Amino acid sequence: MEKQIELLNELGLTGYEATAYLALLGRSSFTSTELAARAKIPRQRIYDVLESLEEKGLCISKDTTPRSYFALDPSMALEVVSTQRTEKLEQERQRIVAHTKDLIQELSPIYQIGRGQNDPLEYIDVLGNPSRIASRALALARTVRTQVNSCIKRPFVLTKEQNWRFIREPLSRGVRYRAIYEMSALEDDELRIWLSTFYEWGQEIRLISELPIKMQAFDDDVVLVSMQDPVGSPPSLTAIAVKHKGMVAMMNLAFEQIWERSKPYQN
């Protein structure tokens, strides 16, 4: 029954109309009161439902006392309903196509004007969610072409597996990867293993007593800066990705200054 109602709905019948028609099929005739009871349709709605079924060609009525209603043979009646429904859908499709063409003509000039307007901060992306920071960092590691300059310190946003991918991906493609760590990394059992592994992979490593900030510069294109919330507890990080050659050049210049003051790592 439910499947039949769904199929009749697709032909354009309402739920009440479908239920009433199926009930009419099961007996030679019904009065409106009988049909309302059989199909469980409110009596105040049954007259509208029957009138609609007659208009659709699914039933007819006889002027008896009280008036009685008969279902028409579905092999003929539903063919007519299907044809009417198809024609209506085609008209609707043509209307939508016409409206779409009108909208394209109206909206295309707005789009073209908008392409000429630049967001003054479109080259800056603020990443407050750890998953977004990790996603952007790994994407940059996959696309860097020639060099990465990195200042690395705790706390870490990336998982161990993500951190190792972040280092290994560029190195596996021959990218020069220079990294400065804090001296305290040598006192950290986990980080000592990391440094030894990364060094064997080809990362150039130096150490300094303290780093002012976490930073990774990718080629001369993008810099990713991570800043710890000074009052957050537990520690939380916000990162900004800046795609601006002047900013990247300045950060690379600062990196070179720290690199020169740092001590080479010895495995």
Image (cartoon, rainbow, N blue to C red):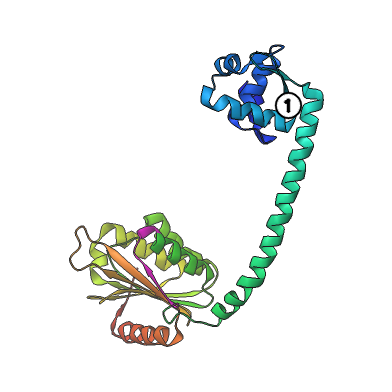
Image: 117 above or below 229 = below
Which quadrant would residue 48 be assigned to in this image? top right
Can you give x and y, in whole percent of width and height, for residue 211 in the image? 26, 76
- Indicate left or right for 4 with 263 as reference: right
Q: Kindly give the residue lying farthest to the top in the view shown.
A: 27
- Taking the image as shown, residue 104 lies to the left or right of residue 120, namely right
60 vs 141: above or below? above
The range drawn in magenta is: 122-131
The residue under the point 71% across, 32% down is 55
Per the image, the residue denoted by label 1 is 58
In this view, the residue in front, 24 or 8, is 24
Would residue 158 be seen by someone viewing this image from the given angle?
A: no
Instruction: Name the quadrant containing residue 264.
Output: bottom left
Residue 64 pos. (x, y %): 69, 14
Q: Residues within 10 Å of mark 1 (few under 14, many from 20)?
A: many
Q: 5 or 216, which is in the foreground?
A: 5
Residue 146 shown left or right of residue 9 in the figure: left
- Where is residue 139? Give x, y as percent: 49, 65
The amino acid at mark 1 is Leu
Report the quarter where the C terminus lies: bottom left
Residue 192 percent location from the top left of the image: 30, 62
Look at 48% across and 69% down and name the residue there.
140
View extreme (right): residue: 76
Q: Is residue 177 visible?
A: yes
Above or below for 206 versus 157: below
